[in-house]
């Protein structure tokens, strides 16, 4: 980025997938990234922002407090890494057993996925 552009680390409405149509676009022909407890779908978008959405099913993570904790951790990691990622829409899906992990383990897994996405972009 050039000197005149201010890097912000905010997470506002424009950085979220909000409507079923937004999600539908990502679910049709996504590029998939996996870890032990996450499946991440990405799809290039034409707007000039990364956007993120969550699909954390009750079937996979029973308690709402745990689902919210996972989303909060991933959202924070995304907020800090958004400027390194390519311009894509991202859907984060949690797998069973993720609610047993501590915050640090969840953060490490999502950081690895961000690195995979960045590596793929460089090819």
Image (tube, grey):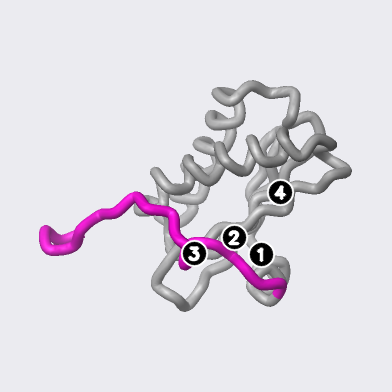
**Quadrant housing residue 91:** bottom right
Whole-percent x, y for residue 81 in the image: 41, 46
Picture layout, residue 48 above or below residue 58: below
Quadrant including the C terminus = bottom left
- Circle 4 residue: 93
Q: Which residues are magenta?
A: 1-20
Dot 3 or dot 4: first in sequence order is 3
Mark on residue 13? 3
Q: Is residue 99 above or below residue 19?
A: above
Q: Is residue 123 visible?
A: no
Tell me, yes or no, whether the highlighted magenta stretch contains residue 93.
no
Task: For marks 2 and 1, give the CA distance.
Answer: 5 Å
Whether tag 1 and tag 3 are in contact, CB under 8 A, the answer is no
Quick check: marks 2 and 1 in contact, CB under 8 Å? yes
Q: Is residue 106 left or right of residue 24?
A: left
Q: CA distance from mark 2 to mark 3?
A: 18 Å
Looking at the rendered image, the disc whose residue lies closer to the viewer, 2 or 4, is: 4
Label of residue 30 in the image = 1
Q: In the shown orientation, is residue 27 left or right of residue 117?
A: right
Q: Are marks 4 and 1 in contact (CB under 8 Å)?
A: no
Residue at 68% x, 68% y is: 23
Residue 39 against residue 103 in the figure, above or below: below
Percent of width and height locating residue 113? 55, 42
The kind of secondary structure the magenta stretch mainly shows is loop
Tell me where residue 74 appears, x and y as whole percent.
Answer: 56, 42
């Amino acid at each position: 980025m050039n000197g005149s552009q201010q890097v912000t680390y905010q997470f506002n409405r424009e950085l979220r997938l909000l409507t079923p149509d937004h999600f539908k676009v990502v679910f049709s022909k996504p590029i998939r990234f996996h870890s032990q407890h996450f499946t991440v779908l990405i799809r290039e978008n034409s707007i000039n922002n990364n956007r993120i959405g969550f699909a954390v099913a009750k079937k996979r993570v029973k308690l709402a407090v745990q689902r919210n904790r996972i989303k909060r951790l991933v959202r924070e990691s995304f907020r800090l890494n958004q400027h390194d990622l390519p311009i894509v829409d991202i859907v984060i899906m949690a797998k069973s057993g993720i609610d047993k992990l501590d915050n640090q383990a969840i953060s490490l897994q999502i950081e690895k996925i961000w690195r995979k996405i960045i590596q793929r972009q460089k090819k």
